[in-house]
Amino acid sequence: MPDPRRRISLTLGIAALGAAGFVLGGLPLPLLLGPMIACLAAALLGAPLRGMGTFGVFMRTFLGVAVGSSVTPAVVMQIPGYLDTLLFVPLFILMIGALGYPLLRKFFGMDHATAYYGAMPGGLQDMLIFGEEAGGDVRAMSLLHATRVLVIVTIAPILMHLFWGVDLTAPPGQSAADTDPVELALMVLAGIIGWKVAERVGLFGASLLGPLILTAILSLTGLINTRPPAEVIWAAQFFIGIGIGVKYVGITGRELRHFVVAGLAFSTLLALISLGFIEALHMLHLADPMDIFLSFLPGGQGEMVVIAIVAGADLSFVVTHHLFRLILVIALAPVVAKLMALRKT
């Protein structure tokens, strides 16, 4: 096995080739999907790739900063207006669990804990912790959730380009040269401090929510008036793409045939459920169609924020719906699991 530095260099090189290929091909989200697909392919071929560790997590903090910097008094006043669509989120979660759990449990023969927490549309780390405590297969749950995120992040840009003609190759903001150096320094500090404080208090999604909250405070007080520059968002996309792809490093033939196939089947079911809710809400004219689309696709927090930023969607609307979904799943999933266990005994 190569030493860690060589593995990191190999991973960065493959990711860069993937990004370059997507840029030259004029494909959407080249700095997210290019590294993701290239690292995925290399991992499946047995390449000894390696995640970016703490630095990769640090780059995710800028997504929280980007969302937080868009929080203004006017945006805060709009949040109560999201109630009509937020009411659909619990039903959305219930339907995913009611259909996803039997699929993984009965059709793919997974044990109760693995099927249950593998089907819950919550954060990866939180579901793995709950699932491991319940006796589930951590590797299986990891591959199920990684495949869910992979599929959603791949199909979302394609559908957005087809239905709304969104240009997902455009710069996601102004350049670093046009950004106030003082504000840029405040963003970096808000990212690091927000992340570490949130991590210390045990907040879920600490690398995104901590910086989001702290930057929102700075934005509301007028200390920050712009988003992170385009170059920073591009870099965050690049490392998030790597993070998704390297989750398949070391995968065996059995895992590929069983868990990844199960993940693809579950993701297909999930996509159909999501599209059903998206179409229903669109027919009710409760919000902008693209905002609804991004809010009811249960991908990862960081990944959906990236797509929303590049697409120019309403960040507060999209993030509020994803946070509400994650809070509900994290708060209620263990309770429902215990009730199911009591019923069986």
Image: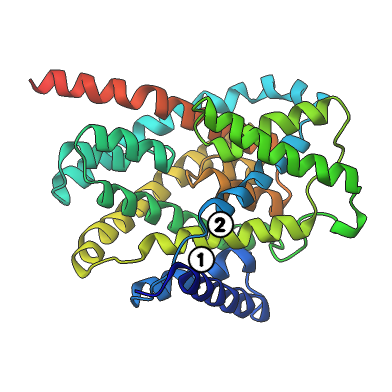
Which of the pair 183/257 is nearer the observer? 183
Q: Distance between the residues labelled 2 and 1?
A: 8 Å
Point out residue 46 in the picture as x, y percentages from the top left corner: 33, 75
Say what amino acid the circle numbered 1 marks: Met
Residue linked to disc 2: 240
Which of the pair 139/73 is nearer the observer? 139
Residue linked to disc 1: 36
**SS class of the residue under badge 2?**
helix
Say what amino acid the circle numbered 2 marks: Ile
The answer to whether the residue labelled 2 contacts the one labelled 1, judged by CB atoms less than 8 Å apart, is yes
**SS class of the residue under badge 1?**
helix
User: For the N terminus, which image quadrant?
Assistant: bottom left
**Residue 51 horizontal side relative to residue 127, left or right:** right
Instruction: Tell me the crowding category of disc 1: few under 14, some 14 to 19, or many 20 or more residues within 10 angstroms, Cα based.
Output: many
**Res. 233 image quadrant:** bottom right
**Res. 316 image quadrant:** top right
Q: Is residue 96 visible?
A: no
Instruction: Tell me the crowding category of disc 2: few under 14, some 14 to 19, or many 20 or more residues within 10 angstroms, Cα based.
Output: many
